[in-house]
């Protein structure tokens, strides 16, 4: 441990981490760059920040501020001390509705500020698509904007005062006073010509320093000039920001045009309608969203190849719709759609919001990167710029998915730059792109800052006099150049410190069929895994929401695995950093669907465990819970005896400890297996045959679910054939990385199921986690076997099979539904909701994982996190549920968690519907 780290630990007790794993997690943000810090610090209060800064100055160590780590230009990585403000300094200190202002700490997430302001009918104007996890401090650092900046302005326009600590150690309140920085007034007076002619030419000119705000006619506003300084001029300790009234009513107009450039041509005329937002999307992006989410899960758009999403406001819903109609009629679009429903509008906005992550693949499926992420030109010149930009891409042999804030002339695009194979192609393209933007009077950055991605290119946009002015401004505030060096002033080369050229291939080695090195680099760092998405039905990432530690986020795990791939920080499959990173992953698979880049840490974890333990002694839990179906089959021969033994508390606790399990848990009770009962012979039904798969969990622990499913499907008109013998999908083998064993079981499953699939018979699964194996892992493990694709296509959930059938009457039944994470990730819960609502049930859906997650919550060392995860969704929902509400949980783990932590009995969908069959109407 270095002397610097020792002194930091004295200054910030318990908040300093110089471990290899932590440095790996913070080596990158959402950019292409990798800069490994010496140490990461998590201050709990401002005094600790002051101490850290003092130590950095004394030792001459660079200091970089970090919020949510969502910076796409490499603004939040540095070689010295990285200070994470998001962990503790993350509160809204006050909201004053009279002055329409709020005082916040730098690490507060924008969504938290919006929630606090909303209680007063207010909001913070700028709202980037990362609002659920970006911090206000980060927004101030980058001068963030978002779609509604067209109405409310950039972050700079919404800042009142900043509590600032500069690089010289001076703490002051930055407002409308230049005297806070000695020499600043003289610098402004000597450079009035440059300030008035080169800066502030249009709203999205945020490259370089926004020194135009220092002009006397602009209020001599130091606070606004420091917005967008990207941490190069000091540390933000707090901020007073301006709030705006929430629109009384809003409506969304979706306008379809021939292509994106034609849509951009229409923007200037639309601005006359004073919209709240004007966003552009390309057909290629929409196609990628459709492929990612699956059929039927993306709202229909008007005809066209490029779209504008235009939001308008009104005093009430009728006025908003009238304004939307007027705008649509004058838009010159091929087709349009006016949306007044909040939920429909949110679904359409989500297409655009997911662009930051889904843009990480081109229309052809190639990896795409944020090398030219957010350039902006004056809106009236946007159409021409887009046409020339397309020509430039063709010239360089590149492709991407453009979208952006067209009302402000800002375009986002990620490109299939060959950063791993031919990084030398990056510089020529960036130079040409910068010259193109400059020729249109534009800005290299329109909202994300210049960072390491564009700092070197600023002389292509600004004169030597302006560049010199930037250098002198920084020197006044950071004379030793310790604050985020390599950014803006004396910038690092645009092709230095790239992450991808270091990546090594980790080709398939007998487990999953992917190259792990390539797979983990799908994570581009947008950080959606750090957001609490429960209000929008998201499930990712349950362990991060429980611990609020970057190591437990999908992104943090991907960063550690990326370091495993490049082999410089983390070495070997058995590296302790890898174990620490993956230990609290619940393998819930929510990241598979919720991560916009499609990162699937559950699969990566299985692959890592496979490679680490193949041919070696494994942890005890791998033999016990990882092969649970084998032991359950043996216990099924004498379930009463096994249950009696486990009912003896001292013996049960001893056995649990010996098995590596938490003694606070109760093992589930075994039942007389369903497969040992005589299955009824199939009865011909008008809906044809169906194969009911009785999986190992249902067979051993919940045979009543299988019996209820037989009755239900028969009543629905199906000829039910029950799977013969034990047909195991290998789920527990997959979760513990015993992939050879999993493949052997899956091949036997294919032997049993493929004839049914080939005959066109639906295969219905009852346990969601097992059904999900057939909808995902099966092909990813055995995709070279054509039978795998056939079985995958034939597999249905119970609700999917019954979609369109009129279910029993559940009017008056309150249902609290816990969707299973694996079902959420592979097929979704929409079919279940349609079936329940068609039955008349009042349904409240719980978002998020139950926390047990198969073997996770049973394993020693995981109990507290398992309970904390349950407190994110399941337990509060059960406590607030109406009297007599039914807990609907198809997952055996979900029912077990509810029973053990809340004493609530859960039922399967087959049981719920089966209980009400006597009230069912005649089949249609």
Image: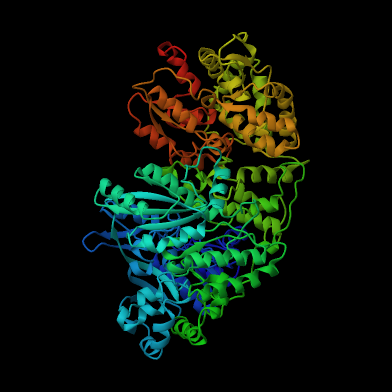
Residue at 70% x, 56% y: name it: 565
Question: Left of 408 or right of it: where is 746?
Answer: right
Residue 327 lies, with reference to residue 607, above or below; the image says: below
In this view of the protein, can residue 109 be seen by the observer?
Answer: no
Q: How far from the left and from the top, in percent, is residue 300? A: 47, 42
Q: Which residue lies furthest to the right in this view?
A: 615
Q: How far from the left and from the top, in percent, is residue 503? A: 70, 59
- Along the viewing direction, whichever of 826 and 60 lies nearer the viewer: 826
Residue at 46% x, 76% y: name it: 54
Residue 127 lies, with reference to residue 154, above or below; the image says: above
Q: How far from the left and from the top, in percent, is residue 41? A: 50, 64
Q: How far from the left and from the top, in percent, is residue 538? A: 47, 43
Residue 491 lies, with reference to residue 370, above or below; the image says: below
Q: Which residue lies furthest to the left in this view?
A: 98
Which quarter of the rendered picture does the N terminus lie within?
bottom right
Quadrant of the rendered structure where residue 655 is?
Answer: top right
Residue at 38% x, 79% y: name it: 212
Quadrant of the rendered structure where residue 417 is?
Answer: bottom right
Residue at 26% x, 46% y: name it: 318
Question: Left of 407 or right of it: where is 791?
Answer: right
- Along the viewing direction, whichever of 801 and 168 lies nearer the viewer: 801
In this view of the protein, can residue 869 be seen by the observer?
Answer: yes
């Amino acid at each position: 441990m270095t002397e610097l780290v020792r002194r930091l630990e004295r200054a910030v007790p318990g908040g300093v981490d110089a471990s290899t794993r932590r440095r790996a997690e913070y080596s990158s943000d959402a950019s292409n760059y990798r800069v490994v810090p010496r140490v990461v610090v998590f201050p709990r209060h401002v005094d600790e920040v002051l101490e850290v800064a003092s130590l950095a100055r004394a030792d001459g160590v660079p200091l970089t501020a970090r919020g949510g780590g969502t910076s796409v230009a490499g603004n939040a990585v540095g070689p010295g001390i990285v200070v994470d403000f998001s962990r503790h300094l993350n509160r809204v200190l006050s909201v004053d509705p009279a002055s329409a202002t709020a005082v916040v700490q730098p690490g507060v997430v924008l969504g938290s500020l919006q929630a606090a302001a909303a209680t007063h009918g207010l909001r913070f104007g700028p709202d980037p698509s990362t609002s659920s996890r970006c911090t206000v401090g980060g927004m101030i650092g980058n001068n963030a904007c978002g779609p509604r900046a067209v109405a409310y302005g950039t972050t700079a326009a919404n800042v009142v005062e900043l509590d600032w600590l500069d690089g010289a150690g001076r703490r002051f309140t930055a407002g409308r006073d230049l005297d806070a920085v000695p020499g600043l007034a003289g610098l402004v007076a000597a450079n009035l010509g440059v300030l008035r002619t080169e800066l502030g030419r249009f709203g999205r000119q945020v490259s370089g320093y926004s020194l135009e705000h220092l002009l006397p006619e602009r209020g001599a506003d130091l606070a606004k000039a420091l917005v967008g300084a990207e941490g190069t001029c000091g540390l933000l300790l707090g901020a007073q920001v301006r709030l705006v009234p929430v629109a009384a009513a809003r409506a969304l107009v979706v306008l379809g045009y021939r292509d994106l450039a034609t849509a951009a041509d229409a923007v200037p005329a639309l601005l006359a309608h004073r919209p709240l937002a004007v966003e552009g999307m390309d057909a290629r992006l929409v196609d990628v969203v459709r492929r990612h989410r699956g059929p039927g899960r993306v709202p229909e758009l008007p005809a066209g190849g490029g779209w504008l999403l235009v939001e308008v406001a009104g005093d009430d819903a009728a006025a908003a719709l009238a304004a939307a109609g007027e705008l649509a009629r004058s838009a010159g679009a091929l087709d349009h759609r006016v949306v007044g429903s909040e939920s429909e509008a949110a679904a359409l906005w989500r297409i655009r919001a997911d662009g930051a992550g889904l843009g990480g693949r081109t229309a052809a499926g190639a990896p795409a990167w944020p090398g030219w992420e957010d350039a902006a030109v004056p809106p009236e010149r946007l159409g021409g710029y887009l046409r020339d930009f397309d020509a430039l891409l063709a010239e360089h042999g590149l492709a991407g998915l453009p979208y952006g804030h067209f009302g402000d002339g800002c375009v986002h695009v990620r490109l299939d730059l060959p950063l791993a194979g031919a990084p030398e192609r990056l510089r020529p393209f960036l130079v040409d792109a910068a010259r193109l933007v400059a020729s249109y009077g534009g800005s290299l950055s329109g909202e994300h800052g210049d960072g390491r991605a564009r700092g070197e290119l600023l002389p292509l946009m600004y004169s030597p006099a302006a560049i010199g002015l930037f250098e002198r401004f920084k020197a006044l505030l950071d004379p030793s150049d310790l604050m985020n060096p390599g950014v803006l002033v004396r910038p690092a080369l645009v092709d230095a410190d790239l992450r991808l050229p270091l990546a090594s291939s980790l080709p398939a080695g007998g487990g999953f069929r992917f190259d792990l090195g390539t797979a983990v680099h799908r994570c581009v760092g947008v950080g959606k895994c750090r957001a609490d998405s429960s209000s929008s039905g998201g499930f990712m990432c349950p362990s991060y929401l429980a611990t609020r530690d970057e190591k437990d986020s999908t992104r943090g795990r991907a960063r550690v695995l990326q370091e495993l791939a490049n082999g410089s920080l983390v070495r070997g499959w058995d590296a302790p950093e890898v174990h620490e990173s993956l230990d609290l992953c619940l393998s819930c698979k929510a990241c598979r669907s919720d991560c916009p880049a499609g990162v699937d840490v559950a699969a990566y974890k299985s692959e890592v465990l496979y490679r680490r333990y193949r041919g070696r002694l494994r942890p005890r839990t791998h033999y016990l819970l990882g092969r649970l179906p084998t032991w359950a089959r043996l216990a099924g021969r004498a379930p009463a005896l096994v249950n009696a033994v486990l009912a003896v508390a001292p013996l049960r606790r001893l056995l649990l400890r010996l098995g590596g399990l938490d003694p606070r848990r109760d093992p589930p009770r075994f039942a007389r297996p369903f497969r040992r009962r005589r299955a009824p012979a199939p009865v011909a039904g008008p809906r044809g045959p169906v194969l009911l798969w009785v999986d190992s969990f249902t067979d051993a622990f919940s045979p009543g679910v299988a019996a209820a499913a037989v009755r239900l499907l028969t009543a629905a008109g199906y000829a039910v054939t029950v799977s013969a013998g034990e047909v195991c999908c290998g789920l527990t083998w997959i979760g513990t990385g015993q992939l050879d064993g999993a493949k052997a079981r899956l091949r036997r499953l294919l032997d049993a199921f493929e004839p049914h699939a080939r005959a066109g018979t639906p295969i219905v699964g009852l346990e969601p986690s097992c059904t999900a194996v057939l909808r995902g892992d099966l092909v990813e493990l055995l995709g070279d076997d054509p039978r795998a694709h056939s079985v995958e296509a034939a597999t249905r959930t119970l609700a999917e099979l019954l979609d369109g059938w009129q279910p029993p009457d559940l009017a008056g039944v309150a249902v609290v539904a816990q969707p299973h994470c694996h079902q959420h990730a592979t097929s979704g819960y929409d079919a279940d909701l349609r079936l329940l609502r068609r039955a008349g049930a009042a349904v409240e859906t719980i978002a998020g994982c139950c926390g047990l997650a198969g073997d996770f919550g049973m394993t020693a060392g995981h109990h507290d996190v398992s309970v904390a995860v349950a407190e994110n969704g399941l337990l509060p929902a059960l406590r607030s549920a109406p009297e007599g509400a039914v807990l609907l949980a198809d997952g055996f783990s979900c029912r077990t968690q509810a029973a053990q932590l809340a004493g609530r009995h859960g039922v399967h969908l087959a049981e719920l519907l089966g209980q009400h069959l006597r009230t069912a109407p005649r089949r249609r």
